[in-house]
Image (cartoon, coloured by chain):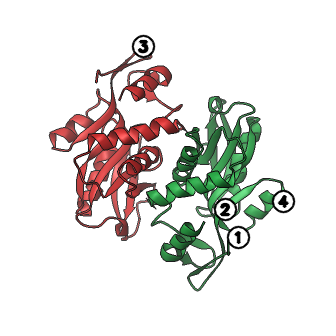
Chain colours: A green, B red
């Protein structure tokens, strides 16, 4: 998506060889118009699919999940909650997710009553890197016997293995922008 | 707002004397259409005001903040981050916020570069009870020398003191619904 690529190249900050900071428009300050149009772009990429619900994980995924849900005609959003607790009760589906950023394992949970068997769910998140969060979310959908329609992310780190692995397993994964490398502080985007 | 009141009475769960669970449409599963119309209702309540930016705190405030920002013509959203850390660096504004729900103190932070002096900011959150989060956000805006236009919340717990105190201090506080009491599991709403 050209507008997102432009924002990344203009306002994104590359750190080291693998950190992309997009605090100024995606995950601390939100460019509301851009996020609204990104939701429409996700809708276009999955235009042929019936989507009953959008699933994401708090907190940075919520904005794109909501604008995507608006673009699909106001379907509901569910955001998985992050918990440090290991004891979460039997009324939730849960999955363990290792965060490379924070170097710790979180549990993510979704109330059982919000996911019904057979529901067609699109997963949305801000970043896809090693694919840990995405794998936790697909695992929860498998437990709930939902249909995972696919996954859409704002930014994929193409130099990390998450996206490729998920695609090899047959999941349709759409990234609105793909970072191929970070070199000397410069973010190198894949050509659309 | 009648549609929100209806949703609270239909799907909200009252626990004990002070817990209102609205997981099914506001802060775990999101009713996207309702949230979009709630943003428009916040816009109407502050129709005479110039709003440059909407400020909230992760994670449950993000959805209403985003739809409010859309209703104001796609102004940006900033969501304060919660941190357990006490050492947060000098590039952020911070405030301590005590959570009665989790019985612990969090630090909330906003990058200095996202708040400019004189910016007119509307604070949005999902709940207002003791007003701790709201007070932390107004404190950050004071540090940044921004103008706090007012505060809008989805649900105010009218039997807890946060809203009244903030109004006595001169802040315009708008609640789309006010819970007056919880009795025998029943949520009693204030008449509009």
Nearer to us: label 1 or label 3: 1
Q: How many C-alpha atoms fall within 10 Å of the one at disc 2: few (<14), some, or many (≥20)? A: many
Which is nearer the N-term, disc 1 or disc 2?
1
Q: Which mark is residue A175?
A: 2
Chain where mark 1 sits: A
Figure quadrant of residue B143: bottom left
Identify residue for label 3.
B184
Image depth: mark 1 or mark 2 in front: 2
Mark pair 1, 2: CA separation: 10 Å
Chain of the residue on which disc 4 is drawn: A
Q: Position of residue B99 (x, y in %)?
A: 39, 42
The quarter holding residue B18 reads top left
x and y, in percent, of residue B145 in the image? 22, 63
Quickly name the residue at label 1: A158
- Please report contact status of discs 1 and 2: CB closer than 8 Å, yes or no: yes
Chain label for disc 2:
A
* Same chain for the residues under marks 4 and 3 in the image: no
Distance, label 4 to label 3, CA atoms, is 53 Å
Give x and y (percent) for residue B54: 35, 53
Earlier residue among tags 1 and 4 = 1
Which numbered disc, 4 or 2, marks the residue closer to the eye?
2
Give me the C-alpha separation between circle 1 and circle 3. Answer: 54 Å
Q: Residue at x 29, y 21 (%)?
A: B191
Q: Are marks 1 and 3 in contact (CB under 8 Å)?
A: no
Q: Are marks 1 and 4 on the same chain?
A: yes
Instruction: Determine which residue is flagged by label 4.
Output: A168
**Toward which corner of the image does residue A4 lie, by quadrant?**
bottom right
């Amino acid at each position: 998506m050209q507008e997102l690529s432009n924002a990344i190249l203009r306002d994104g900050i590359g750190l080291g060889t693998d950190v992309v900071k997009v605090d100024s428009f995606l995950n601390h300050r939100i460019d509301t118009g851009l996020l609204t149009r990104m939701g429409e772009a996700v809708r276009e990429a999955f235009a042929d699919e019936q989507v009953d619900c959008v699933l994401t994980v708090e907190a940075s995924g919520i904005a794109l999940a909501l604008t995507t849900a608006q673009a699909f005609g106001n379907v509901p959003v569910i955001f998985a909650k992050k918990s440090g607790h290991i004891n979460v009760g039997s009324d939730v589906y849960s999955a363990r997710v290792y965060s490379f950023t924070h170097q710790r394992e979180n549990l993510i949970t979704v109330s059982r009553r919000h996911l019904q068997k057979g529901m067609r769910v699109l997963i949305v998140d801000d970043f896809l890197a090693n694919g840990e969060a995405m794998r936790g979310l697909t695992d929860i959908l498998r437990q709930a016997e939902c249909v995972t329609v696919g996954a859409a992310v704002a930014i994929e780190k193409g130099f990390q293995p998450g996206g490729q692995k998920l695609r090899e397993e047959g999941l349709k994964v759409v990234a609105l922008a793909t970072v191929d490398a970070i070199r000397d502080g410069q973010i190198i985007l894949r050509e659309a």
